[in-house]
Amino acid sequence: MSRAFNIPPTVDLIEEVIGHLTVDGSDYSRNLVVFPGKRPAHFIRKLLGEKIGHAFVPPRLFSIDNFIDFIYTEQLGLAQRQLQAIDAVAILHEIHRNSPERFGGTSFDDLDAFLPLGLKLFGELEELRMANLPKRKLTEALAAVTIGSVRPISSVYDTFYQKVDALGCTTRAIKYTQVSGALSERHLGEFASIVVAGFFALTEAEKSIFLELKEMDSVVFLFQRGKGLAKHLKELDLTPEQGPENQSVDRTNNIHFYQGPDSHGQVFGLTGK
């Protein structure tokens, strides 16, 4: 069973993550760290370099999207090309042109005119797919979702994903749902320690992934205290231990305002701070 910690926002999350890594000499490669985004990976490598002072083998550092790609390609062995948004819009535009009930009549027949609507429509479809709803609830949700004042998108959803499948392609949402349904401990057996840090609100697909990770002894969850976190922890059936308090933090005078004539002036002004 995994462990979970709830740490105050005054505690350095990067330091806390490093404290849960296992190391063999200068080799951190048997650790996997997952953050919501890409940027924290840079600070992990930077701080490890400062602490060690010489060459080292870093842990595997992933954003949640990169983690999904890692499981999808390297562990599940799937290699479908992920559609870019513009590719998805082209498919949706084709569906629109062939539909007897076109959005806005003929107003969006031209691809340039359809592009903004297509991007928004693709985002709505992906959000619904990521929700990983049962068929009945999905049907209800599709009937309720519209794009502006146009008709519901229920008639587009199935057609779009059928075309994606026929093309041998995938989308971000499809990857998430496939990984959430297939992930098991054997896919992560090479790692001695898996740290999942900095997450708050989760999609249904992410919740399924977290529930699977929760059962693994090698996994440590690090949450930062904040309003609404208790609800999300309850959904995951997690009762985290209370992390360390940092009593040395000065809670005053943490915010400073600087003024510059333009963005370049602001950057130059902050470089000396």
Image (cartoon, rainbow, N blue to C red):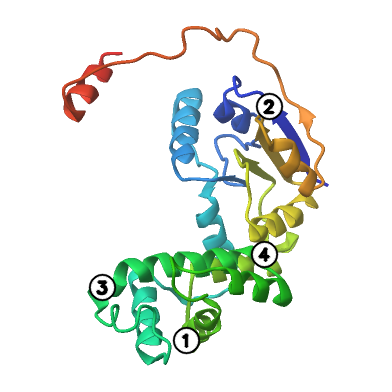
- Is tag 4's residue or tag 2's residue first in the polypeptide sequence? 2
- Is tag 4's residue or tag 3's residue first in the polypeptide sequence? 3
Q: SS of the residue at dot 3?
A: helix
Amino acid, disc 4: Ser
Q: Is residue 72 visible?
A: no
Q: Quadrant of residue 108?
A: bottom left
* Nearer to me, 53 or 159: 159
- Is tag 1's residue or tag 4's residue first in the polypeptide sequence? 1
Name which residue lies at 45% across and 24% down: 50
Q: SS of the residue at dot 4?
A: helix
Name which residue lies at 35% across and 78% down: 104
The residues tagged by marks 1 and 3 sit, at their Cα atoms, a distance apart of 22 Å
Q: SS of the residue at dot 2?
A: strand
Name which residue lies at 75% across and 57% down: 212
- Is tag 2's residue or tag 3's residue first in the polypeptide sequence? 2
Mark 2 packing: few (<14 Cα in 10 Å), some, or many (20+)?
Answer: many
Q: Which residue is mark 2?
A: 7
Q: Quadrant of residue 78?
A: bottom right
The residues tagged by marks 1 and 2 sit, at their Cα atoms, a distance apart of 45 Å
Q: Which residue is mark 4?
A: 180
Amino acid, disc 1: Lys
**Residue 111: image location, x then y, percent:** 26, 78
Q: Quadrant of residue 263?
A: top left
**Residue 156: image location, x then y, percent:** 50, 81
**Residue 194: image location, x then y, percent:** 66, 45
